[in-house]
Image (cartoon, grey):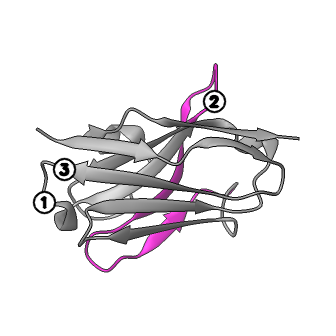
Amino acid sequence: QVQLVESGGGLVQYGGSLRLSCAASGLTFSTYAMGWFRQAPGKERDFVATISWTDGSTYYGGSVKGRFTISRDNAKNTVYLQMNSLKPEDTADYYCAARRGYGLGLQPGQYDYWGQGTQVTVSS
């Protein structure tokens, strides 16, 4: 049974930082591309970042590029999202997801497995 478990969310002030973690089990982690999405109340689930399983290449959504960094540790079956210079508009539930395949995974429908999410709140 595949499980993705996010952690690291919380309340942070404007300009602060958080690091989210997503621990995976039940899958061969090194063969899955990983992504982070976020969903604010009343809004759609939006792409944040993704990292490939082949060469570790990354891609970011426009609103987080330059502030967020996605990384992975295949030895620990974990993907991370370092979030710096946080803004109130970053407030959302953050989800990690796993997908097989190549290319960019920018849409939620491209992912096979999802975590339950972790809440991030940025105060102004």
Is residue 48 a member of the stretch shown in magenta? yes
For badge 1, the amino acid type reads: Thr
Total residue callouts: 3
Q: Earlier in the sequence, mark 1 or mark 2?
A: 1
Please name the residue shown 56% across and 28% down the image. 44
The alpha-carbon separation of the residues under discs 3 and 1 comes to 8 Å
Quadrant the C terminus occupies: top right
**Image-based side of 72 in relation to 82, left or right:** left
For badge 2, the amino acid type reads: Ala
Mark 2 sits on what residue? 40
Which element is circle 2 on? loop
Please name the residue shown 38% across and 61% down the image. 79
Q: Do the residues labelled 1 and 2 touch (CB within 8 Å)?
A: no
Instruction: Count residues near mark 1 (Cα–Cα under 10 Å), then give few for <14, some for 14-19, many for 20+.
Output: few
> Residue 69: percent from the left, percent from the top?
56, 68
Range drawn in magenta: 39-62
Q: Which of marks 2 and 3 is nearer the N terminus?
A: 3
Instruction: Count residues near mark 3 (Cα–Cα under 10 Å), then give few for <14, some for 14-19, many for 20+.
Output: some
For badge 3, the amino acid type reads: Ser
Which element is circle 1 on? loop
Q: Do the residues labelled 3 and 1 touch (CB within 8 Å)?
A: no
**Image-based side of 67 in relation to 32, left or right:** right
Relative height, residue 79 to residue 40 (above, below): below
Please name the residue shown 64% across and 22% down the image. 41
Residue 28 circle label: 1
> Residue 25: percent from the left, percent from the top?
19, 50
Mark 3 sits on what residue? 25
The alpha-carbon separation of the residues under discs 1 and 2 comes to 30 Å
